Structures are given as structure tokens and as C-alpha cells.
Image: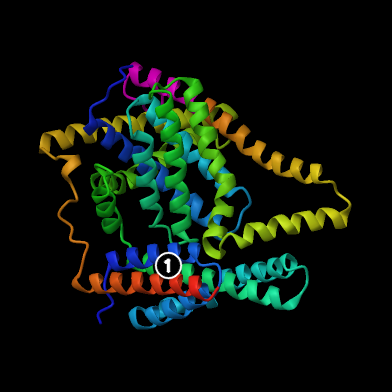
Amino acid sequence: MKHIVPRRQTIIRAAVFGGLWGALEITLGGPMQAAHIPFRGTVMTFLGIGLALVGFALTPSRGFVFLCGTTAALLRLLSPAGQPLFAMAAIVVEASLAEITLRAFTHRPSTVALVCAAVAAMLWDFAHPFAVQTLHAGVDLPLAYIRIVRKGAGMLGVSGFTVGAVVAALLMLRVVAGVLCGLVASGLSRAVAARLQAGIPTPDE
Amino acid sequence: MAPGGFVGSVHILLASVLAAAVCRGTGAIVLFLLMGLLWTVRRPCVLRVVARRSFLVFAGIIAISAIIAASGSMTPAVRLLVLMLSKAATVMWAVTGFAATATLENLACLGSRVGIVGLGFAVGTAANAMSRSMADIRDIWWTIRMRRNGKPRCRDWQRMAVTVLARTSTRADEMLLAAEARGLDPEGAAAETHLTTSADLWWSLVAWSVAAAAVLSDYYYR
């Protein structure tokens, strides 16, 4: 698989994969957000970033994942359900984090690079609600949350360690999801490359 | 003054978010009042967003947080609540106003202007490819279902994912050939859209003046 890909091919491939990600965001992400389903961000990041990473592994080039994410974010605007603007911001930030991580691996589509990129994107899913609420109500709100957690832990007789363990578990959930996403993307990209080499794909194969 | 367009909304959003982030005291209330006045003139329907259920729930969370953070004493709790609600309402108005003027074309053009090369072309191509990708997914899903008598196996999901992604990749190559045959240049597309209207300049000026007034009042009346 060659490493340097022409810019035009990168843009068009990123557009088509971004279109697929955008379609998932519209049909799945929007309704999930409107229905307030828990961990919807994790599910959508898994699907979206996974898709972008498969595309990247097939077309390893600089800016692919970022352009793919930005395209999907703009398509998210078409979804009538939920508040699209913050979801769009989350998609762009996640794609940027994945892109920066891939740049650290000099854009070689190795399994380690894909896993690290997926984990980096997943970590934003954990930070996103806090970032949005801080943007809305200022830094006083997260500070108030910390006090609430401390007081609640004191009232329930739960140690600070247990509270920290719950937060760490939520963070670990994202890390595990990220590792899985990277591994799935790596496996799928190999299978797709083999299928493409074998010939034009049809569902009857 | 005319309501203005997308660029005005971008400036109001930036001014609102930055001023809300900087103001820690009286400035937040000044910002809330002046931005409220601005939106009354520019687009009054935006003000209604604070009456939505989602915002009221958020306000309730803020109220509980403020009371607990102030250790139950009323005066600091009310002060904290008013400050946080003022900032939340200001940002919410700006976000809603921005969303009202933001179209795919505007955002793609803005992306191209800030250096995301090919974004305009990518969005157009993606919007075009999206419906066909969805049709592909549906066709592949029904093919697999029919082959398994309506009971797809676990392994079929992987097969479906590989087929969908391979189809997507092939479609991208076809689009590349079509673009090259027509002589389209993805890096130069969407450059002709005019984003700025004459009223936008004045709205941007007003927005940044409001933000400056809020920050100054925050500094002097802390």
C-alpha cells in the first residue's frame, strides 16, 4: 500500500467516507441524542472514528481523518433531531485528536497508530459534556460539581478513593472502547483491502 | 438595521463565548442584558430558547449546584446562580442565532476560507454519496437476510461491514475518475460563495463593543 496519496484522491475518499459517517450521524446519532440514550457519544464515536480510520488505512494521507470528520460534522446539521451544534463540535474535535495522533505516527496505518488515534478520540467523549457545560456556565460549574461529589461522598460515607474509582472506570470504559475501535478498524481495513484486490465487491460473494 | 447573515452570527458567537469566559462578576449580567437587547433587535425569536425544556432542566442543575457550592447560604448562592444563568443564556442565544443562519454552503465556505482545503467540494460530494451509501447498506442487509432466511448470523455483520466499506471505497474511485474526466478541481471549489453582507460589518462591530463593555464593567465593578 503506497504511503503518499494524491491530494485529489484524499479529498474525494474523505468525502465519501465522511458522507457515510454523516449518514450514520443523521440516522442514528440525532435520534439517540433526542432520546437521551446514555453513552450515545461513545457509540457514535466508535462507529464514526472507526469508519474514518478504515478509510485512512486504505488511503493513508495527511488530513484524511480531519476532513472526513469535518464533512460528517457539517452533514450532522441536516439532522432534525437534537442540538446539532455541540455534536458537530465534538465530531470535529475527535477527528482532530485522531489526526494529531496519526501525525505522531507519521501517518503510517499500523495497528498501534489506529488504536492510539481511536483512544485519543474516545477520550474527548469523556471530556465533552464538561467542556460544553463550562462553556455555558463558566468555570464555576465544574468547581461546583467537585464540591457536590465531595459532599455527597462525605454524606454517604464513601471514601474519595471510591469516587475516584468510579471516574476512573468511566474513563477506562472509553479507553477500552477506543482500543476495540482501533483493532476493529485495523482488521476491517485489511479485509476490505483483500476484497478490493480480489475484485469488485458484490453482496453475493 | 437589517438582521444580517452568517458572518455577523459568527462574530456574535465568538464575542459572546469569549466575554462569557472572561467575565466573573458584574460583567456577566451586563453581557446578558446587552446581548438580550442585541438579539431583540436582530432576531427576537432567538430569545425564546431560554423557555425550552432542555434549558430549564439545565437551569435547575445550575441552581442545585449553586446552592450546594455556596454551602447553603442564600446570598452567595443567588449571586452564583444569577451569574451562571446569565452566561448560559448569553451563550445559548449566540449558539441558536448561529445555528439559524448556518447552512451547509456557508459552513463549507467558511472552512475553505480558514484553510481546510477541499471542504466545500467534500461536503457536496458527501451529500451526493450519502443517499447512495444508505441504499447500498439497505440492499446488502436485505441480501444477507434473504440468504439466511431472515436470521442473520453474528459473522454476517462483519461480512456486511466489509462489503459496505469496499463498496464505499469503489464509489470513491469512480467519483475520482468522474471528477478528473470533467476537469473538476476539489481544492478550488466553493470559493465563489459570498458570505458577508453589508449589515454583518455593523453587527460584528456591535457584538465586539458589547463584549468589550461587559469585560470593562467586570473589571471596574468587581
Mark 1 residue type: Ser
- Quarter that holds the C terminus of chain B: bottom right
User: Is A37 within the magenta?
Assistant: no
For disc 1, the neighbor class at 10 Å (few under 14, some 14 to 19, many from 20) is many
Residue at the far right in the pictured view: A157
Residue at the image point whose x is 43% and y is 31% from the top: A53
- Front-most of A94 and B145? A94
Query: Which residue is rendered at x = 80% and y = 46% of the image?
Result: A160
Label 1 resides on the chain identified as: B
Secondary structure under tag 1 reads: helix
Where does the image place residue A190, in percent across and percent down from the top left? 44, 20
Q: Residue at x 39, y 42 (%)?
A: A69
Dominant secondary structure (helix, strand or loop) of the stretch shown in magenta = helix
Q: Residue at x 56, y 58 (%)?
A: A134
Q: Is residue A191 magenta?
A: yes
Please indicate, yes or no, whether residue B141 appears anywhere in the rendered image: no
Q: Is residue B173 above or below residue A76?
A: above
Q: Nearer the viewer, residue A113 or B25?
A: B25
Q: Quadrant of residue A189?
A: top left
Place of residue B135 in the rendered image (x, y in percent of width and height, measured from the top left)? 37, 43
Question: Considering the image in quadrants, where does the N terminus of chain B appear?
Answer: bottom left
Quarter of the image where one finds residue A103:
top left
Percent coordinates x, y for residue B170 in the rendering: 30, 29
Q: Which residue is mark 1?
A: B16
- Can you say whether A116 is above or below B218 in the image? above
Q: Is residue A110 visible?
A: yes
Residue B212 position (above or below residue B156): below
* Residue closer to the observer: B174 or B186: B186
**Is residue B99 left or right of B84 when viewed as pictured?**
left
Q: Which residues are magenta?
A: A185-205
